[in-house]
Image: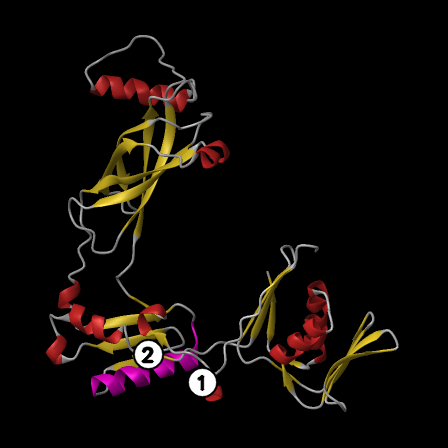
Amino acid sequence: MKNLIFIITFLVLASGGHASPNRLKDLVSVKGVRSNPIIGYGLAIGLNGTGDGGGEITNNSLRKMFQKLGLNPQKEISSKNVAAVIVTAKLPPFARLGQKIDINVSSIGDAKSLAGGTLLITPLKAGDGKIYAMASGQISIGGLNAGKKFPTAGIIPNGATVEEEVIINFDQKKSLRLSLRNPDFTTAARIEKTLNQELGGKYATAKDATTIDLVIPVHYQRNIVQLLAIIENFKIISDNAAKIIINERTGTIVAGGDISLKPVAISHGDLTIEIGGEGAGGNKKGGHSMVFFDKKTTLNDLVKSLNAIGVKPEDLIPIFQALKRNGALVGEIELI
């Protein structure tokens, strides 16, 4: 792993006094406030000989299109200037009639490029089968280099118009459900405590590690937007499980949480590590790299000392795994 990437992110618990608080809006999502995927099938025309050049799906689509326009072609229709495409988009929360949204266009046939193409009017449907937007417009495949690399996919900024609204009646809600993006019991409890303290009553209840239910105070009913604008800026110190995530294919290591190391001795190649022994810091003796810690230490201290004596990043993965198997590393290791 010559191109090994080593990333360490240390998130200290609130008790350590060094953790930075986060805004509530960055930690949770509100039930009902989300985008919805929509999808449709259409035709891209005006290609400079880089289209499908025929095919059952494209030919049938061309025939049906001409019939809708009042034409009745007798022979099979095929053209290299036409391509069958799938159009996708995300319907934003609270999308309103006439609102413009961006769309993605991707070839599904043998087209070599969608450059210069125009998407014909394409209805976009959601999972319930209803049409929520109509798409059309000039396809952009990005810059020249991007066009060469991915010429069969493009975008149309503001390429679809919302034709159907998702009715939520958000302002009439009597309660809200907040969902933690990263489930954690400690963080959920802190959010509950902060909400109740700031709102001046027992309004929030943490149901589990993910869910916090919030009853709308009487003076904020039918004014939920103002309430959310206030509470989403509350500061919360989030907690993280002690975990190291290792991707051996890319050589990426990400460590977070309150990871600590118990007394242990480990030897890896020419490297010797002792935690709980005499001395401190790192040095070299007899051609061997030796690192000593005189007490229980943290992963941060270990990594700094190993870097100071020139330990290669690829050696850290087996060291972490060995420390975990021995029980000396207090935390979880996850391989992806």
Q: Which mark is residue 235?
A: 2
Kindly identify the residue that appears in the image at 25 percent across and 75 percent down. 231
Which x, y percent locates residue 108?
A: 43, 31
Q: Main secondary structure of the magenta part?
A: helix
Label 1 to label 2: alpha-carbon separation = 13 Å
Residue hosting label 1 = 14
Which x, y percent locates residue 131?
A: 23, 41
Tell me if residue 192 comes above or below residue 57 in the rendering.
Answer: below
How many numbered tags mark residues here?
2
216 vs 44, left or right, is: left
Q: Nearer the viewer, residue 63 or 26?
A: 26
Residue count near mark 2 (Cα–Cα under 10 Å), binned few <14, some 14–19, many ≥20: some
Give the position of the N terminus as an image quadrant: bottom right
157 vs 274, left or right, is: left
255 vs 261, left or right, is: left
Q: Amino acid at mark 1?
A: Ala
Circle 2 SS class: strand
Q: Earlier in the sequence, mark 1 or mark 2?
A: 1
Circle 1 SS class: helix
The residue sitting at the right extreme is: 286
Q: Which mark is residue 277?
A: none
Residue count near mark 1 (Cα–Cα under 10 Å), binned few <14, some 14–19, many ≥20: some
Decide whether residue 191 is among the magenta residues.
yes
Q: Amino acid at mark 2?
A: Lys
Q: Give the color scheme: rainbow, by chain, secondary structure or one colour.
A: secondary structure
Decide whether residue 280 is among the magenta residues.
no
Which x, y percent locates residue 13?
A: 48, 83
Give the position of the C terminus as an image quadrant: bottom right
The residue sitting at the top extreme is: 74
For the record, the magenta segment spans 183-200
